[in-house]
Amino acid sequence: MAQAGDKNTKFFHSVTKARRIRNNLNTILDENGTIQRGDEAIGDVSEKYFQNLFSSDQPSNDIYAKVFEGFETRVSDEINRDITKPVTAKEIEAAVFSIGPSRAPGPDGFSCAFYHHFWEDIEEIQLFFRQEHLSGVISENQAAFIPGRMITDNVIVAHEMYYALKSRKRQAKSYMALKTDITKAYDRLEWRFLEETMRHMGFCQQWISWIMKCVSSVNFKVLINGSPKGLIRPERGIRQGDPLSPYLFILCAEVLSHLMHQAGASRKVQGMKLSQSCPNINHLLFADDSLFFTLANQKSAKGIKEVLTIYEQASGQAVNLRKSAITFGRLVKPEVKRQMRRILGIHNEGGGGKYLGIPEQFTHKKTEMFEYIVDKVKERTQGWHKRFLSLGGKEVLLKSIATAMPVYSMNVFKLPKGICEEINSVLADFWWGSDQGKKNMHWFAWNRLCLPKSEGGIGFRDIERFNLALLGKQAWRLLQNPECLMARVMRGRYYSSGLRFVVGNGTTISAWDDPWLIMDPPRAPRPRDAELRHYQVNEWIKDDRSGWNEAIIREVVIKSGYWLAMHLPENPGIHTPSANRELNQAIWKLHTANKIKHFLWKIASKSLPTRATLRRRHIIRTSLCLRCCQQEETANHIFFECPYAQQVWRASGLFHSALFDPLMELETKLVSFLLNPTVYTSMYTQHQVLWVLWRIWKSRNVLIFQQKSIHWRSLTRYAMNDASEWIRAQEMTQEAQHQSNNDGREFRHRLWITIQGWVKCNYDGSFRGEDHNAKAGWIVRDDRGTYLGSGQAEAKKVSSAIEAEFQALIISMQNCWCQGYRHIIFEGDSRNVVNLVNNSSLNFVLFNWIREVWSWMAKFKDIAFTWVPREGNQAADLLATRNLPNHTNFVYHSYVPEFMSNVLHNDFFSSS
């Protein structure tokens, strides 16, 4: 366990063994209600049940002719050519890796985890299910598994419809919503129906043959207590867990959409509109979750009944009437309700359940409606309370599971403030610990823990602020996808007159026809020239990269949006001094056990429960150190001033005068050995310091709570052993990873390039956090690696290291352009900078820097940006970190400077 420390390891899954025992099957009821015992008898009952389930109902040709009447072809010849072209090795790889590693193993006992680990040449056959194909084939009423469509779209639209049934007179008086449950949706899907659906959609015979072979070439056995029993040869059904199955299912569900659209067009089923500007909606689908909206009259009820009946006969998809429900408008008459229930055969009253995991309707007491979220979080954290978890383990669980549990609801609704506070309270209680319902002391408020680690927090999410950031994502979706069903409903309902937006690159805005100006034109319109009719706004914008980008905004509304929410005026953060910020950053960057990091965080944040701290909180009466009984027990005294601690440090050989300076504060001492390389030069020595601190604290607790004293020589030996064991374990892990991933090969970077006539400029930036000063360094070499020149510059103050890298790149581009280089590669050791400049990732905060780089790009004839590991960028790093002469902010070296000669010599020969 030393290799993993307190990370999320097998410890968090230890309950699996107990679960396996509970899953042992001893008895089963057969179809006659008789109890059967023994593996063989249980196997026979199971085989009979599944054989019956997977037996086809043999729908007639007349049924299929009626179902597919008027069904339009959606798949073009171009799509068919694309999906049937030869499969590459890379595509096979994606197919295998799309299957979960822990899915059921094959007959040979190997699960997909085996192939994921050992096969590097495997990919996906699901060419058809790429965005450009699937979204054009499936109607907008289906939101499942379609790239660009979201489950939250259906939730939002459904809630608007339910709200209208309750509060808007027209809908409340005459309409109803029908939520249906499909019995064994995947298992009962008829194979012939799937084949006919693909044929009528326009798929070519080769594709259909491929799919049907995947679906029909299967036999099953039932696993009873680890032993396979029986043999089942299915005639229908698609497999759960198969990556193809969800897509095949929604292809078939498209037939249901077709039938509902036909019924709507023939007025057999009248859908529901929220306003004159809203689309008419008679159904919403999300995989097998179906929701229907229609007039509460005899004609529409019979129309829906007819559609569901013929769809069931053709596809095998049977509606479970006992689990389905009807929600009537608030003003629908009782006699109409009775008539609707009789026609549809559904007698459950809806509105009080859930749709896609969210309550269908809200009452005036919204807090009560969302209380289930709090209960889920409480239930999960109470189970964790029983485990002896370190703060590192708690952090993993809170960030990866607990704070993620309410995210789905927060994507759609603004949770009541009381609910957010209650969830925060539950999370805080778990973090600080509780014993048999009794809360432990909370050393900080939750909003302090929600600060970034660099500001003294742990980086948890404040639920209310995170909720606002997630809702901002939905607001952007309305603007970015104005023609999706959800956006059209919301636009028609709330802003039918439109919204004001910022002009981006102007490529889709007609300069003459679209209302893109804030005010009316200064004069009356006149007939326009035919040549001017097709002008777009982008023709009047010089910078074609100035527009907003969806990926940028997505980052703003979730990441940057959350940061902004945390720093709103009504929520002033707890801002730490810059020195403390630097210390916090150093703590969390340490390569050590998580429990050590959290221990150091407690020291730096003054939340360590020393006797002095406890006395200030009126927990104890005296704050004297129990070892020496001479001074107050502060953190500084425990670790450095107490005679016991000083004996430990001397015995360890780690004694340093700075650590025992009585005038130096504890924070300064921590900075001295974490950030000052002159105090402890080796990584091994630094680890020893960390484990000595940890052991001193543990021995103090043993003395107080167990009344046992550990001799300082023994404690020193324990600490040295801890450090050695940790380092040895990490070296073993790194060696194993190196052999696995790199096959024992060392990185050798080629300093020069092979394109004749090009040059390469290696650049680097340095950043000093305490004063935000930045420097730049760069070196230029030709295609043979020959030195052409280098430079150093004092740059403008910046707020982060990545901004210093950007500034170094821009300065080096400016200098290279002035030197006359026009065919050039710029190479740096910041992968983020290279990705941002090459458009492979985007960042709103850095967008002005990116745009400045793009501006200089246009001045070169040929240009490229590449990344190099830090060891391949040592010359530029030396230039960026070396001090410039006094009163100088720019130096250009036409000849190799003396301080660089060794670095250039080593670089050249190590890469040749």
Image (cartoon, rainbow, N blue to C red):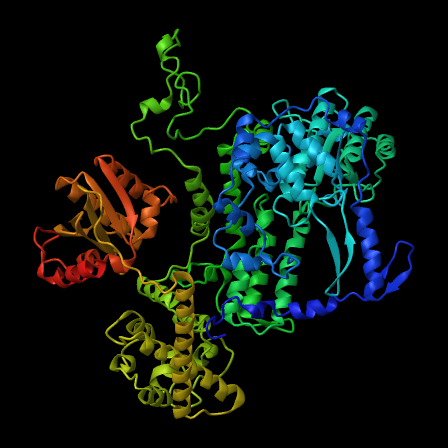
- Split into 4 quadrants, where in the image is the C terminus? bottom left
> Between 338 and 197, which is closer to the camera in this rendering?
197
Tell me which residue sits at (26%, 71%) in the image.
676
Residue closest to the eye, 294 or 637? 294
Residue 417, image x, y percentages: 58, 51
Count every numbered label the image shows and give the total: 0
Q: Answer with left or right where residue 604 lies relative to residue 868.
A: right
Q: In which quarter of the image is residue 815?
A: top left
> Residue 150 at what x, y percent from top left?
58, 40
User: Looking at the picture, how far across and down is residue 437, in whole percent?
Assistant: 64, 71
| 501 on left or right of 133 | left
Q: Is residue 444 left or right of residue 342?
A: left
Where is residue 317? Give x, y as percent: 76, 39
Above or below, comparing residue 184 to residue 26 in the picture: above
Q: Is residue 706 above or below residue 330?
A: below
**Residue 819 in view, yes or no:** yes
Farthest-out residue, top:
527
Tell me: residue 387, above or below residue 76.
below
Task: Say if 104 sits above or below 142 in the image.
Answer: below
Given residues 487 and 17, the one toward you in this image is 17
Residue 283 seen in the figure? no
- Seen at 55% across and 60% down, the residue is 114
